Amino acid sequence: MMTIDLNCDLGESYGAYTIGNDEGLLQVATSANIACGFHAGDPHIMRQTVKRALHYNVVIGAHPGFPDLNGFGRRSMALSPEEVYDIVLYQVGALQAFVHAEGGRLSHVKPHGALYNMAAREMTLAAAIAGAIAALDPSLVLYGLSGSRLIEAGGAAGLKTASEVFADRTYQQDGSLTPRGNRNALITDENAALRQALEMVKYGSVRTVQGNRIQIQADTLCIHGDGAHALAFAKRIRQAFEQEGITASPL
């Protein structure tokens, strides 16, 4: 039986500002990556999101990012590997405390935004992230872009890894995601995004913006939760997988 984990970035509200439909998405996703207060979220939002995830029996992961609330963690920052180690350890440890206090167990870590993309290319940053996770809890799974340095660094640190793919992002020939600043970075046509998701999961390949197909490993599929139609699209993806005999299941 073919299975796929559907992960969603959640807990990205902050103070009086609400982002996304966490309640609805938790009924579709199989794992949740919860913001840890640096790029989004705050202590109250973190605890509430953990409680909701446990209520819906959704696997919980930490979603650490750069300290960049204004830029939502999507702006590159020139942090040293030591600084990256520290901010990842700090954020994952904070979320792990909330999960433990609510009677749950932290399952994985998925870096956010610019931190994720930079670590996908730069081994020193990827190793810093993997090292922080391994030092805190070597049973945690590291989510990273399929074929990236994050996956390589996680394996070198003795961590289990999960290769992540994206339905609504375009790919370059080297397997990297097209930078968000480019006009063709996002796939806005839901039917096209759905076709890409099915191709990656069923056949292990994806068409690049250059027009070629490359091989890709799909252990977990990201569903972005901050779009206006995120919940409706998430339901479409899950229904399409079920029709193809693909079971949505946590890793």
Image: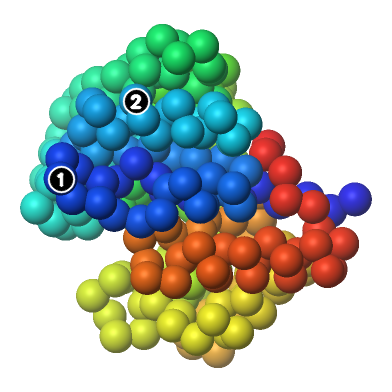
Q: Which amino acid does label 2 sit on?
A: Arg
Q: Can residue 121 be seen in this view?
A: no
Q: What is the x, y in percent for residue 222? A: 52, 56
Q: Can residue 183 be seen in this view?
A: yes
Q: What is the x, y in percent for residue 214? A: 62, 73
Mark toward the start of the polypeptide (1 vs 2): 1
55 over 12 or under it: above or below: above
Can you say which quadrant of the picture contains the C terminus?
top right
Residue 221: which quarter of the image? bottom right
* Label 2 SS: helix
Identity of the residue drawn at 57% across and 40% down: 31
113 over 161 or under it: above or below: below
Q: Which of 71 and 142 is in front in this view?
A: 71
Q: What is the x, y in percent for residue 182? A: 27, 80
Q: Which of 180 and 245 is in front in this view?
A: 245
Residue designated by label 1 = 16
Residue 80: which quarter of the image? top left
* Label 1 SS: loop
Tell me if 243 is positioned left or right of 227 in this view: right
Q: What is the x, y in percent for residue 137? A: 47, 14
Identity of the residue drawn at 45% across and 14% down: 102
> Alpha carbon of mark 1 to alpha carbon of mark 2: how far?
15 Å
Instruction: Please say which color scheme the image uses.
Output: rainbow
Q: Which amino acid does label 1 sit on?
A: Ala
Tell me if 193 is positioned left or right of 92 in this view: right
26 over 127 or under it: above or below: below
Tell me if 219 is positioned left or right of 47 in this view: right
Using a 10 Å C-alpha cutoff, classify the residue at mark 1 as few (fewer than 14 neighbours), some (14 to 19) or many (20 or more).
few
